[in-house]
Image: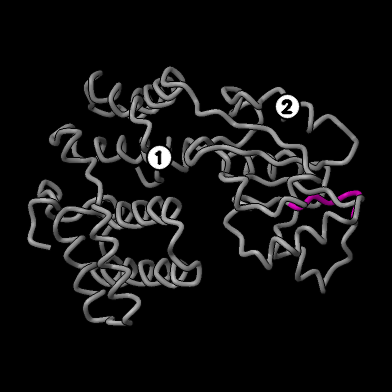
Amino acid sequence: MSQQLVYKYRPRTIEDISYMNIYPIIKNILKQKSKLRFLFKGDIGVGKTILIDVLRNELVKQYKIFTLAEYLNKKDFVFDKTNSVILIDNLDYLHIKNQLGIKKILENSDINLIGTINNHNKVNENIIMRLLLFKIYTPCIKHNLVILNNIKDKELIQISDDDINNIASDTSITIGDKINILQKFYYTNGKYTLEELNIGIQINKWNYFHKICRCRDNKQVKIFFKQIIDYGYSSIDFLYEYLNYIKMEVSINDILKFKIIKLIISYIKEFYILEEINSFLYFFSNKLSNILNESNI
């Protein structure tokens, strides 16, 4: 298996998201010729980014597609208002200055814009007033089971019905996280339990991580990261856990968040590329069965 399952089985067409409650709405959006001004709201993990990707794949057949950054830096092309669409994922994560820029864009009634949000309280109210708002609901457990069992059967993954039911029923993780757990079962041939494969990094560990990052103590940051890897976490665990953590933690400065993400990626490169570790160890360290909470980190 050379390709990550989460990307191999990622929805790409409108029919791939037929399980979403907004599926009929999306079909109508793709048919209509009027202005495209929509905002889709949903909890973390419901599929907002998947929706934006699908819309990009479908709308590109009729429109020129731009991200917010591409639109704001439109120096090298002529922006055709009627035949272009701006797509913005996680609009509520944008800095207030960027949101004011979006407000200004929407003052031009000819511009098409579609976005997603998690928390409407973090969005400039003038933006919400100019976009038609729809709610995306969390996919049911039954649908999660269909996706996971389909991958399990196609990839011949050894996993018990109880474990796959428990993964599908876990409301604290996204469908992408669930598929990554399946990939771990694939690589270990059922040798480990679900509990051993699905361990969360404690929040107090992230608090310590932020503290040493704020102090720019690169030596301690490097030690912390290597300890996490050595005690049973893969690079994807580390990055996924941190991304999920900062989505929920509103007290952290956005600039610090991006600096830390960049730092994590740099250490992933150092520990995994320099040691020539293959895709197997992209998901595992050499001490997978050791549990972080039992370590002395």
Out of 235 and 190, give the one closest to the viewer.
235
Locate residue 285, reporting x and y percent: 19, 55
Out of 163 and 281, give the one closest to the viewer.
163
- The amino acid type of the residue labelled 1 equals Leu
Image quarter for residue 266? bottom left
- The mark closer to the camera, 2 or 1, is 2
Image quarter for residue 172? top left
Residue corresponding to mark 2: 25
The residue at the point 59 percent across, 28 percent down is 16
Location of residue 125 with respect to 19 vertically, above or below = below
Residue corresponding to mark 1: 5
The residue at the point 56 percent across, 35 percent down is 11
Q: Earlier in the sequence, mark 2 or mark 1?
A: 1
Mark 1 crowdedness (10 Å alpha carbons): few <14, some 14-19, many ≥20: some
Image quarter for residue 144? top left
Q: Is residue 55 left or right of residue 296?
A: right
The residue at the point 92 percent across, 50 percent down is 110
Locate residue 54, reporting x and y percent: 64, 39
Q: Is residue 235 left or right of residue 145?
A: left
